[in-house]
Image (cartoon, coloured by chain):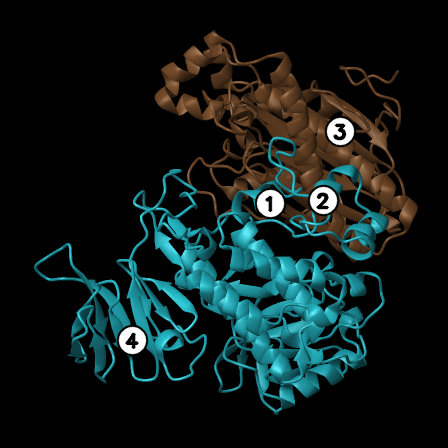
């Protein structure tokens, strides 16, 4: 167990409908979920490890017309499966390299399998209707037929996924498709990107849960808490990155959020987060934006206004209030 | 993140050359890799061990490898030891991996695509490389995707992380192998890594390359909800069952409809029947007889024969897709019972030539190499010494062009003899025999 695991962590998160989605009447197709549970509205959980945060970005393209459902399903199954794995390891006292191997090489397949199972169930109860297919046909012509091909239905639910899990000794990051994880070190300034961008994808292409053998397209990072020494971890969908002029400007959000938390308190950041993301989307990408922050309440003095809401096992409501 | 050595740091190499760190290139389970200037030798890579991996046993193993030479040019072999006086840690110098090489895991993940002929070449090159290592009395101990690289343009292979290479059956000093590639007896902690356990790992690697799945993850994997040591020991150690074992269906490959991830054999099922029976039978032997009986594992030579047969049998259907000739599908009526995997039609077979026991498909782009018509140069596909060409004025007539500097002698279907001088061609016609010098081939259609 790392000394860094002592004390509690706070998870806050928010997901906003993109400015262009509002104009076009499209719903927010991003999703966020965590253990301990937070909800889509700005919310917060305070707990000791293990903590798990997942964000997902539904593709939103004409053929992925159910990607909002796909994204919601993705974050929920990802958190559930990851929690199962972590709980299991705690009982087994495994070596770190074994945990690394299993989480990086086996967990993605379990997540993809669960996601495809849930999606298939949703599809069985709600087959594509004529109106949906007509819209896809109008938008992409004969490419609509790909939805009817073997394994093609998953395309309608296509989504990316990022999962970050913090335990008492390690941090696991899994990612398929675009989106970003930033780790701000305990100096409050240094920023590390545990999973580098996927350079094998070009243009607007992204790896997706809907693809064949999607488990092989996961990228991952497994680091000891002592090695990474995180003070804050920011996990976001690509709508946030695309709202900035360049990578350094985007990466600055990590130290900036940390300063905001230190200066104004976590509750202030939690309350304002949604409107900041709205502004970012409005002035930037126009896309849905989802951001989750995992913040370590370390030895450094914290503002006294830190509310303790949503203890482990107690799900806060949509406003983030404790039961 | 690189924390061990800073740019500009100077290390002392065993041969006395100052080694100056330029920048970090990456990190792995045992240490970090840097680009460095190695005295006046130019730029090389330095692998520097994490303190917990910088053991006396590792140092001793490295010193032995450095004394020895690389088994072939396919290995990024340790060249010299480097130390930082007083730090207690150490590393070694090796050549830099060129940027053209990509990891095999990238191919399996679908991030890099290669055509069938390149894929076969990768299989041949990897197998030859490990064969060269084994004939030196060494074993690799950790054959997996992580340490083999390939050039997508031509299938050239490079074997990295050779610091875990050891004398066959030597005492274990840390590395037992990458779990999914471990032989069952290693998973069960009942044997030491050896060339026989390497052969198992090589089989897994080849199966993965040609089927994009693991040979032992079939139906049973769906019952495992959370992977743990017990589950892994059962699947890969205690009760391993090949997903295509005809006598034991308990772990049979499951189709994508039942497991859309393809992990339980769905991907392998898509590829298995594409290959000719002889190739499939080699995997059958590897993962039935060879699964628990290490002495009955498929040897590198057997793999090379199987892979060469696959290479020889490659042809294109009229729809453009690569297919593999399966001698068992050719019926006495001349009909070919195996339909094209892509268009579903019965493919029109091209001319083919029988040389000894081999049958080589003479496609429009086919070539013969020293392996086919050389003087005992088995598995040497490096140079083209005969090529299928189209007649310059009659596009319906094809010939086999002599690219050597010696004449061949052809016996035409009417029994007449004709010299085929260097640079000249002999028309492709059934029952034509060609004496290449050391071997003779007969053309069939």
Q: Which of marks 3 and 1 is nearer the N terminus?
A: 3
Decide: marks 4, 3 in contact (CB < 8 A)? no
Q: Which of marks 4 and 1 is in front?
A: 4
Q: Which of marks 3 and 2 is in front?
A: 2
What's the mark number on residue B385? 4
Chain name for mark 1: A
Residue B440 lies left or right of residue B290; in this view the side is left
Question: On screen, A246 above or below A127?
Answer: below
Decide: marks 3, 1 in contact (CB < 8 A)? no
Q: Mark 1 points at which residue?
A: A216
Give the spatial CA distance, label 4 vs label 1.
Answer: 40 Å
Q: In which quarter of the image is residue B192?
A: bottom right
Give the spatial CA distance, label 3 vs label 2.
Answer: 40 Å
Colour of chain B in the image: cyan
Q: Is mark 4 on a helix, strand or loop?
A: loop
Q: What element carries label 2?
A: helix
Relative image position of residue B74 (x, y in whole percent)? 51, 75
Give the spatial CA distance, label 3 vs label 1.
Answer: 24 Å
Which quarter of the rendered picture does the C terminus of chain B lie within? bottom left
Residue A1 lies left or right of residue A137; in this view the side is right
- Is residue A323 something one can see in this rendering? yes
Q: Which residue is drawn at 62% across and 19% down?
A: A69
């Amino acid at each position: 167990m790392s000394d860094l695991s002592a004390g509690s962590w706070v998870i806050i998160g928010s997901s906003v409908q993109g400015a262009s989605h509002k104009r076009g009447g499209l719903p927010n197709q991003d999703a966020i979920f965590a253990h301990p549970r937070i909800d889509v509205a700005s919310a917060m959980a305070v707990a000791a490890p293990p903590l798990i945060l997942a964000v997902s970005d539904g593709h939103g393209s004409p053929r992925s017309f159910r990607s909002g459902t796909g994204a919601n399903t993705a974050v929920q199954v990802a958190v559930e499966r990851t929690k199962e794995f972590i709980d299991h390891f705690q009982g087994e006292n495994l070596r770190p390299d074994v945990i690394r191997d299993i989480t990086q090489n086996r967990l993605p397949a379990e997540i993809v399998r669960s996601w495809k199972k849930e999606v298939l169930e949703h599809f069985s109860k709600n087959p594509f209707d004529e109106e949906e297919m007509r819209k896809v046909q109008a938008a992409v012509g004969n490419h609509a037929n790909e939805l009817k091909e073997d394994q093609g239905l998953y395309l309608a639910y296509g989504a990316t996924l990022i999962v970050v899990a913090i335990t008492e000794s390690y941090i696991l990051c899994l990612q398929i498709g675009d989106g970003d994880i930033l780790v701000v070190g305990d100096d409050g300034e240094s920023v590390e990107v545990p999973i580098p961008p996927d350079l094998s994808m070009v243009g607007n292409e992204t790896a997706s849960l809907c693809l064949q053998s999607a488990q092989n397209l996961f990228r991952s990072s497994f680091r000891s808490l002592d090695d990474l020494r995180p003070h804050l971890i920011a996990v976001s969908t690509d709508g946030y990155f695309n709202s900035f002029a360049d990578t350094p400007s985007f990466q600055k959000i990590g130290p900036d959020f940390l300063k905001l938390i230190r200066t104004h308190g976590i509750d202030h950041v939690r309350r304002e987060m949604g409107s900041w993301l709205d502004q970012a989307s409005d002035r930037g990408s126009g896309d849905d934006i989802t951001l989750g922050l995992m913040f370590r309440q370390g030895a450094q003095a914290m503002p006294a206004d830190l509310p303790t809401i949503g203890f482990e096992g107690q799900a806060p409501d949509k406003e983030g209030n404790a039961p | 993140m690189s924390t061990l050595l800073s740019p500009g740091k100077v290390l002392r190499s065993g041969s006395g050359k100052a080694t100056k760190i330029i920048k970090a290139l990456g990190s792995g389970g045992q240490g970090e890799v840097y680009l460095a200037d190695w005295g006046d030798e130019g730029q090389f890579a330095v692998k520097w061990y994490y303190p917990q991996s910088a053991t006396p046993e590792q140092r001793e193993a490295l010193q032995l490898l450095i004394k020895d030479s690389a088994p072939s040019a396919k290995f990024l072999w340790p060249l010299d030891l480097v130390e930082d006086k007083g730090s207690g840690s150490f590393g070694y110098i090796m050549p830099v991996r060129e940027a053209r090489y990509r990891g095999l895991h990238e191919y399996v993940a679908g991030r890099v695509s290669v055509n069938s002929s390149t894929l076969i070449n990768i299989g041949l090159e990897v197998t030859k490389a490990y064969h060269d290592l084994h004939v030196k009395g060494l074993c690799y101990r950790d054959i997996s995707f992580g340490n083999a690289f390939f050039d997508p343009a031509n299938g050239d292979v490079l074997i990295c992380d050779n610091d875990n290479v050891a004398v066959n059956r030597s005492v274990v000093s840390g590395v037992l192998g990458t779990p999914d590639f471990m032989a069952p007896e290693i998973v069960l902690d009942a044997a030491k890594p050896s060339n026989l356990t390497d052969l198992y790992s090589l089989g897994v690697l080849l199966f993965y390359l040609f089927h994009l799945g693991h040979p032992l993850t079939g139906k049973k994997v769906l019952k495992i909800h959370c992977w743990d040591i017990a589950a892994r020991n059962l699947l890969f150690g205690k009760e391993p069952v090949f997903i295509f074992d005809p006598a034991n269906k308990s772990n049979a490959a499951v189709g994508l409809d039942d497991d859309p991830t393809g992990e339980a054999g769905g991907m392998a099922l898509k590829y298995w029947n594409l290959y000719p029976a002889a190739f499939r039978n080699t995997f059958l032997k590897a993962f039935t007889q060879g699964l628990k009986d290490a002495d009955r594992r498929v040897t590198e030579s057997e793999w090379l024969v199987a892979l060469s047969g696959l290479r020889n049998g490659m042809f294109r259907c009229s729809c453009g897709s690569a297919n593999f000739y399966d001698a068992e599908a050719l019926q006495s009526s001349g009909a070919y019972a195996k339909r094209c995997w892509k268009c579903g039609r019965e493919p029109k077979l091209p001319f083919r030539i029988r040389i000894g026991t081999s049958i080589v498909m003479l496609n429009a782009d086919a070539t013969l190499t020293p392996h086919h018509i050389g003087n005992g140069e088995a598995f040497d596909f490096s140079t083209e010494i005969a090529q299928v060409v189209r007649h310059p004025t009659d596009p319906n007539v094809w010939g086999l062009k002599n690219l050597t500097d010696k004449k061949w002698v052809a016996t035409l279907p009417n029994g007449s003899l004709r010299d085929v001088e260097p640079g000249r061609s002999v028309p492709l016609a059934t029952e034509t025999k060609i004496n290449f010098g050391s071997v003779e081939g007969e053309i069939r259609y």
